[in-house]
Amino acid sequence: MKITALAAHTPEAVRAALAARGWETQPAWFAAVGIQPFVALIEDISESEREALVHWGTKSGADVLTGGSGLGTGGWALVTGSTSRIAPLARYDRVPPELSRFAPELGKLLAARAEPPRSWPIRGAELSLEKPVIIGIINVTPDSFSDGGHLTSVAAAIEHGARLTAHGARLLDVGGESTRPGATPVPPDEEIARVVPVIAGLIKRGLGPVSVDTRKAAVARAALDAGAAVVNDVSGLQYDPALAALLARADAGVILMHMRGTPATMDDLATYAHVAPEVAAELAATAEKAERAGIARERIVIDPGFGFAKTATQNFRLLDELATIVALGYPVAVGLSRKRFLGAATGRPVADRDRATAVACALAWERGARLFRVHDVAMTREALALAGATTNPP
Ligand code: PMM
């Protein structure tokens, strides 16, 4: 006899064990996903729903922990078990009527886990998410926190874009407004004057696709007219009420980032009891708002906004629990590059955080992030090549 404890942090070990014993690819994959642990935190529920859940858990072999007063109104329950044990709870015809209210939301989470998005349609292209997508940063701002003032001419910015592309960037993100803590907004005309010549120049050189990092509809419109394929909005549609409608009419990709307040006010809003579920809920509301405004779901990428209204400790928790954000079912982008919390762990100044960035990106990939916005593309590419080869063997 021989007993082996298999790796359980992804479905891969179970899939490989079944495949090695003659199972076909698809059934082996579905069985492996079914065995994966699933932990659902259900909040704002009634007393009778709590009681029905405990009863259902006893019968179905799921563990259920509950409490009477949560962070919101009403009670809460933590329901845990293998994915296939929890799955019937997502079928309103398979559970007692008191539990049928959970079915649609749970169904969405389970579907996203079984079928994660494999590509991201942007304007004029479709980016495969099977391999990491590295987004190279081109900041044309006099005051961005990590590389401000570095690219002082249009020509230098375009040369920088050529270098990032040669190093493996699959998207170039051009930004003309600093969003570091306490930064003051740039008038739209000034922002347009900074980014449009660079975007147009990159496209003329055959570099790109290009993304514009802006919160403003006027800047997004000018950038799209100049050929941008993606709009990266760090405000998550909170800053400019005209942006959602513009994006609904355009066929561009959209990155919606989480933050609270504005760069001027965000540091005081880093108040979370448990950061990952709260950021996930706020991002889910943002994505819903985008879809209600007419932006196609498949064009949306979400980003938890590392460093935006988060303390160092909260950033580390969010990185560790990134799978909570990935579980929403949208492709996830992360902007970790050179950020302050990396310095808190390594003791390195901003100019010496590219190694920490590369490691953090590899950790984020392992937790399900697929897009990585970085300054040093070459170093991150190497880290992600290794991470990608480990979790997605070639
Ligand atoms: N961070 C910055 C700017 N833009 N966009 C996204 N989507 N995610 C981020 O984390 C993000 C961003 C700030 O960093 P920078 O000043 O070095 O560009």
Image: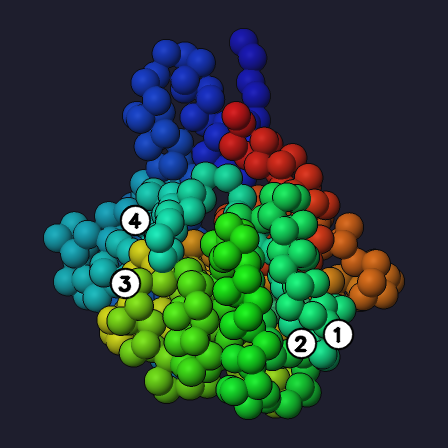
- Cα distance, mark 2 to mark 4? 41 Å
Mark identifier at residue 141: 2
Residue 43, image x, y percentages = 38, 71
Identify the colour scheme used: rainbow
Mark identifier at residue 111: 4
Residue 5, image x, y percentages = 57, 26
- Out of 198 and 27, give the one closest to the viewer: 198
First in sequence: mark 2 vs mark 3: 2
The residue drawn where x is 72% and y is 79% is 143
- Cα distance, mark 2 to mark 3? 31 Å
Q: Secondary structure at mark 2?
A: loop
Is residue 91 shown above or below 241? Answer: above
Q: Secondary structure at mark 4?
A: helix
Identified by mark 1, the residue type is Gly
- Cα distance, mark 4 to mark 1? 45 Å
> Dot 1: few (<14), some (14–19), or many (≥20) neighbours within 10 Å?
some
Do tag 4 and tag 3 residues touch (Cβ < 8 Å)? no
* Whether the residue under disc 2 has CB within 8 Å of ligand 1: yes
**Which of the two marks, 4 or 3, is nearer to us in this view?**
3
Tell me: 53 left or right of 387: left
Q: Quadrant of the N terminus?
A: top right
- Cα distance, mark 2 to mark 1? 6 Å
Identified by mark 3, the residue type is Ala
Mark identifier at residue 149: 1
Is residue 38 shown above or below 141? Answer: above
Q: Quadrant of residue 256?
A: bottom left
- Cα distance, mark 4 to mark 3? 18 Å
**Which of the two marks, 2 or 3, is nearer to us in this view?**
2
Is residue 271 shown above or below 367? Answer: below
First in sequence: mark 2 vs mark 1: 2
Do tag 2 and tag 1 residues touch (Cβ < 8 Å)? yes
